[in-house]
Image (cartoon, grey):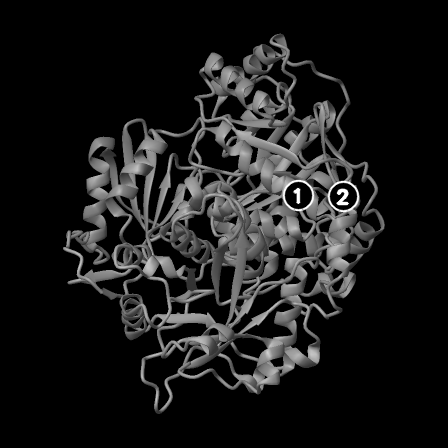
Amino acid sequence: MVNFSSGALSALILSSISGQGVDAFTGLKTPAPHASLLSMSTTESAAPSASDVLWTPSWKSGARDELFGPIDKYCEDLHLVTRRKTRTVTCGPISFGSDHPIVRQTMATTDTADVDATIEQVMRCADKGFDLVRITVQGRREANAAAKIREGLFKKGYDIPLCADMHFQPKVALLVADALEKIRINPGNFADGRKDFEEKIYETEEDYVSERQYLLEAMYPLVEKCKELDRCMRIGTNHGSLSSRVLSFYGDTPRGMVESAIEFADICRSQDFHNFVFSMKASNPLVMVQSYRLLAAEMYRLGWDYPLHLGVTEAGEGEDGRMKSAIGIGTLLADGLGDTVRVSLTEDPEFEYEPCNRLAEIAESRLAINPDARARQEAVKPYKDTRIITSFARRAGQLPEQREGDAVDVRGFLHRDGSVISAVTPEMFSTENVQYLYQELGCKTAVGMPFKDIATSDSIYMSTIPPSTDTSARTAIRRLIEVSMGVIVPAEELEKDPLPNAVALMTLEDAISKDGKLPEGAVRLAISLDGDEEEESLKKVKELNPVLCLLKPKEGISHLHASRRVFEIFKANDIESSVIHHYTTETDDSNELALQMGTKVGSLLTDGNGDGIMVEQVGAKQHFSVDFVRKSSFGLLQGSRMRNTKTEFVSCPSCGRTLFDLQETTASIQEATGHLPGVTIAVMGCIVNGPGEMADADFGYVGTLPGKVDLYYGKEVVRKGIPNDEAVDALVDLIKDYGMWKDKEEVEEEDAVAA
């Protein structure tokens, strides 16, 4: 074996074989049938020396840039939604890759050792429409059970492929590869054993790479087995379980996630094994998006073409879980990235199908191979996309400033961390409705007077207003303005019947023609944009200096690309006006609304483009309440890591490793602690991702033994072995100990005071 000690020589050879096999270290190809009982006596070939592997050249030293050039692109086309071209990876009867439909998958929540229960759940998932189901395999008992599950499903006529979820156990992974079609390995703990946060000191990069031998020894036999049996593998990096080795060298970063995966891919490639996919999961959608884009960009410059498995890990439940998943997954699918999708919800796996399938459907409908989608994307006026995917920076729109002579405080019309504007109607200001409206807007009230709270709408929008003769309604509106809530009204309505201290909304064309002159009584200008304005017109926004712009791309052009164009023009011309996404919807399905908002608006917020959201319901279907839309809007901002208005929960989706009833426990924790904005609590069913996800949470609740829970503060376990029935109260006490607790406010019933 030749020892490639030169990084340059290694890289040049690697580049020349990028799309070909490297027939080194190959085991004998003797097929093995599925077995109902597996033997641990499988012989393992000795791993080669790490110095003999063609490792990808270093990113830190600059060798990768020198040999392959800088990162150039991360997707096929910035202006037309085009799937990234990948190889085909097979997994039993299904295939991953750009030549195949997006694969829908889920994960069983049963105890894998309970063979009958797992078979029944997998069958329900297959009947629902899933293409693949993952099951946990903690040890030999579960590996033997997995073989029986596979055999039992075949006997019942189900050939849906199964994936073994492996952590910590290279020998068990080798064992279960005899039975299942796919193996998921986690680079953060597959070879490193139990997760820890011990800081390692590396004086040089040579010190870091010198430890690769143990990675190779752990992975080599499994890769050899997978190649021999034509198994599929997922190299699944998780932000919450990076190894202490990677954390010490790269930090808790997207770059660390990517480099960790590349190391394991190098081992696979050195054995001419290419039947694998990548994943870059995180509970934070922004980290998740940046990590996948960075990996895709690295694959482009290295000449790799492996498919991508998309998912936001520990997304949670209900609309929040769907919203967070849509933000992360929807953003990447809109880039043409992603070949298989899993929506991780703290619910039974069957309930993951609808959001999973819907996200795939939305993605497939956006592809430029569809004539309608292509026409919308080509209808967007030309622009240069200058987004930098290797770092994240949020555009900070200008906030309202108080001017001499202002009769009201305008500074609360928008919020620095992202604004929510609620669309309301004149009927809501009637005497019998107005107190309910104040509540729907998230106001506190005292003797019938509204006051802003932490999750109160910042402003409201009305397409028409109550007449000035309706003094009761006008007084109710005035009371909102007096607590610094903006009231946005089309300028033509204000010209008919002035409303003192309203914000006048004009189209850009009208604002230019009127030179920004406001109707009588209006306090500020707002401009509506349809994304199709000429660049010269958009430049004039700077001198018009509106308090905000409402961006609603017109019908017939791509919402995503038209919006990106506006932000690019604003950036190029130093236009700092706040931009609020004006999103209209006809749906009456709450889950669909969460997916729409996350996919359409979240995909812009993940790039830092946008200062808030206004959802306007249109059409004949039953409308959601103002309260529901407001809360959903704040959920979008929180999921996009902009504005926290409630406790953030990082909740794993449950699996066979879970040591308590995750859905019931999560509900209890949310009931006890859901009123703590700015506090993040991770609820983890087992130790696999638990400690890692504590890095993204203030407090952690982690199952460690049956009936027992450990509590974390950040990365540190501070209370161990707490009985399940005492653990929620203990968590509350821990939050109090660290000074982050506040008591729930009592809701007082008031007699409505006539406005």
- Tell me the amino acid under the disc marked 2: Thr
Q: Is residue 86 visible?
A: yes
- Tell me the amino acid under the disc marked 1: Leu
Q: Residues within 10 Å of mark 1 (few under 14, many from 20)?
A: many
Q: Residues within 10 Å of mark 2 (few under 14, many from 20)?
A: some
Q: Is residue 7 visible?
A: no
Question: For the residue labelled by badge 1, is the local secondary structure a helix, a strand or a loop?
Answer: loop
Whether label 2 touches label 1, CB < 8 Å: yes
Question: For the residue labelled by badge 2, is the local secondary structure a helix, a strand or a loop?
Answer: loop
Disc number placed over residue 194 in the picture, else none: none
Q: Is residue 270 above or below residue 460?
A: above
Q: Is residue 619 above or below residue 133?
A: below
Residues at marks 2 and 1, CA–CA distance in whole angstroms: 9 Å
Can you give x and y, in whole percent of width and height, for residue 754 in the image? Answer: 19, 62
Can you give x and y, in whole percent of width and height, for residue 515 in the image? Answer: 57, 87
Task: Identify the residue at horizontal 42%, vertical 62% (top origin).
Answer: 420
Task: Identify the residue at horizontal 49%, vertical 29% (top origin).
Answer: 349
- The residue singled out by tag 2 in the image is 86
Q: Quadrant of residue 74?
A: bottom right
Task: Identify the residue at horizontal 75%, vertical 61% (top origin).
Answer: 379
Could you tell me which quadrant the N terminus lies in?
A: top right
Could you tell me which quadrant the C terminus lies in?
A: bottom left
Can you give x and y, in whole percent of width and height, for residue 454 in the image? Answer: 30, 62
Q: Quadrant of residue 229?
A: top right
Q: Is residue 27 above or below residue 460?
A: above
Q: Nearer the viewer, residue 269 or 284?
A: 284
Q: Nearer the viewer, residue 155 or 259?
A: 155
- The residue singled out by tag 1 in the image is 308
Q: Is residue 72 left or right of residue 134?
A: right
As drawn, which residue projects farthest toward the bottom?
404
